[in-house]
Image (cartoon, rainbow, N blue to C red):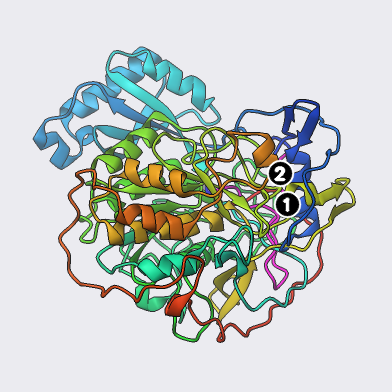
Amino acid sequence: MPFLPDALHDSGGSHRRALPPSIGRMHDRTSGLLRLTRAHLAALALASGLTTLAGGPALAAKVPAAEPASQASAPLYTGNIIVRWRDAPTPAAKTAGAAATPAGQDRLQALSSETGIALSVKRQMGSERTLLAPAAAGADPEAVAARLRQDPRVADAVPDRWLRPFDTMPNDPDFATRQPYLMGPTQVPGGANLPAAWDRGRGSADVVVAVIDTGILRHGDLAARLLPGYDFISDPAVALDGDGRDADPTDAGDNVPQGYACPGLPAADRPEPNSWHGTRVSGVLGAVTDNGQAIAGVDWQARLLPLRVSGRCGAQLSDTIDAMRWAGGLPVPGLPDNPTPARVVNISLGGGSCSTFEQEAIDELAARGVVVVAAAGNNAGAVEAPASCRGTVAVTAHVDDGENASYASVGPEVTLSAPGGGCGVSQTTGSAAAPVCLGPISRIRTLSNTGTTTPGSDTVTDSQGTSFASPIAAGVASMMLAVNAGLSPSQVIGLLRQSARPHPAGTYCDINAGTCGAGLLDAGRALQAAVSTVPGGVEPPPPTTTTPPPAAGGDDGGGGAVAPLAGLVLLLVGFAAAWRPGSRRR
């Protein structure tokens, strides 16, 4: 799913309901005699609404652990099965759709007969993959996939599952009008050090960044950066735009009416408004910058390719895989070729563990020089797919003082941490019924919209979650490719790790080495490393424009590269409301 909609609150008081108890379970980690109950802390953080920390105390002992939970949360399945056939179809069958040919029909009929599972074809997915629908409603998808894998005609079978956006929104009043998390570490310990990076480069229009999310609204501080994009949602009930796939990636919404039950969730006890998640994520990455309006984006020049996969109830894995492949220029049956392949793909969605098909898509993209950046998740537990897949830039989140955010998922798959807002682990205390954030709450400024079920007016709001840490890292990756187009994905990942600053001493990530990646994202050091690295042999796409280099500046944000934030004058005040424990959204 996208990371399941959590108890989502924006500064206007919108909400999303909590997930089932199986999601966001208690997760404890031990270092010597220090026991850290991260999932419990996440519940407290989400219940309190979170802010900026200006040098909180060293990590203190936590509320006693309830139960260890090192596994990713239980997946929610669509009921369909993604199958790769062992024998590749002929070119003619590929053109017609392998299952539409007599041989394809015979193969499917034989598979159904041998396995005892009545199957029908929903669609072809490319690379000899087919999305199949079992006739029996309610069948165990894992058991069905396991049975199909035993058939000699099938090379692999994986249940299709829901992915949902990771996103945590504050519910406390906030008068912030700037973005301290973009500044250098001498000003903000957890700052991403963007001004120093902007002294070296501000991106290039030759670099395309795909944002796989809920689609896009043409916000006034974003529209100039957008490419046409595509809508990959195949189910009209999820899309909410009256049809299936088409060339319009406009965010038609992900609202849930009162009484509507998404798969795996109880019926909504109140109407749930649109999140405009894709617009918020895209604004963090690439809002128009240095124009005296709204917010500063990370990359000033890259073109953004909005790909819509998530609507009502989230995203389906099958749609997301197709969008990932198409983003990098790989063919998808029934769709036109992508005229503007991406070098960077941001995915602030996820759920479950990495499947073979997700891994294959990431491997195929890497072979084409495409860097995949993904949010780790907001369940305060194990990293979720696709961030848990090999070869991704998996991003967890920290607050302004550099401490890991209490909601952020962590684990050995994490590449590094980027600013994501929230409350630091050691600053979250109390009980699930009465949580307290002892420090100020860090927030990420995002572009959004006032509409609840249909678009209203452009606005700027505050957000929290690994959903918003991921596009900060993706923007740095795209700027690295702008200054050195020949870098391979593995080089980008390695340079991000090498250039990261250490986690603050005494914090959760320092004490529990290896769980939060190499350290804190440092854009200035990452671009410096990119400039001085010999390319890894990746052939970049032919250039179409040239971006002149900016004037040089200081290491920690000096010079004229700092984007003016004077236009950021909209004060947003949230209505106090309790977060529901156990909820999550990247």
535 vs 116, left or right, is left
- Label 1 sits on residue: 424
User: Which kind of residue does numbered mark 2 sit on?
Assistant: Thr
Percent from the top left, x then y, of residue 57? 80, 51
Q: Are marks 2 and 1 in contact (CB under 8 Å)?
A: yes
Q: Which residue is located at x 68 percent, y 50 percent? A: 403
78 vs 323, left or right, is right
Q: Which residue is located at x 36 percent, y 78 percent? A: 224
Percent from the top left, x then y, of residue 570? 63, 83
* Image position of 90 with respect to 402: above or below: above
Q: Residues within 10 Å of mark 2 (few under 14, many from 20)?
A: many
**Any mark on residue 462, and which?**
none
Q: Which residues are magenta?
A: 3-20
572 vs 537, left or right, is right
- Label 2 sits on residue: 507
Decide which of 511, 459 is in the foreground and name it: 511
In primary-sequence order, the first of circles 2 and 1 is 1
User: Which kind of residue does numbered mark 1 sit on?
Assistant: Gly
Asked if the magenta segment contains residue 58, the reply would be no
Percent from the top left, x then y, of residue 487? 27, 49
Percent from the top left, x then y, of residue 533? 29, 49
420 vs 414, left or right, is right
Q: Secondary structure at mark 1?
A: loop
Q: Which residue is the extreme one toward the front?
A: 554
Decide which of 358, 308 is in the foreground and name it: 358
Mark-to-mark CA distance, 2 and 1: 9 Å
Q: Residues within 10 Å of mark 1 (few under 14, many from 20)?
A: many
Viewer-nearest of discs 2 and 1:
2
Decide which of 100, 399 is in the foreground and name it: 399
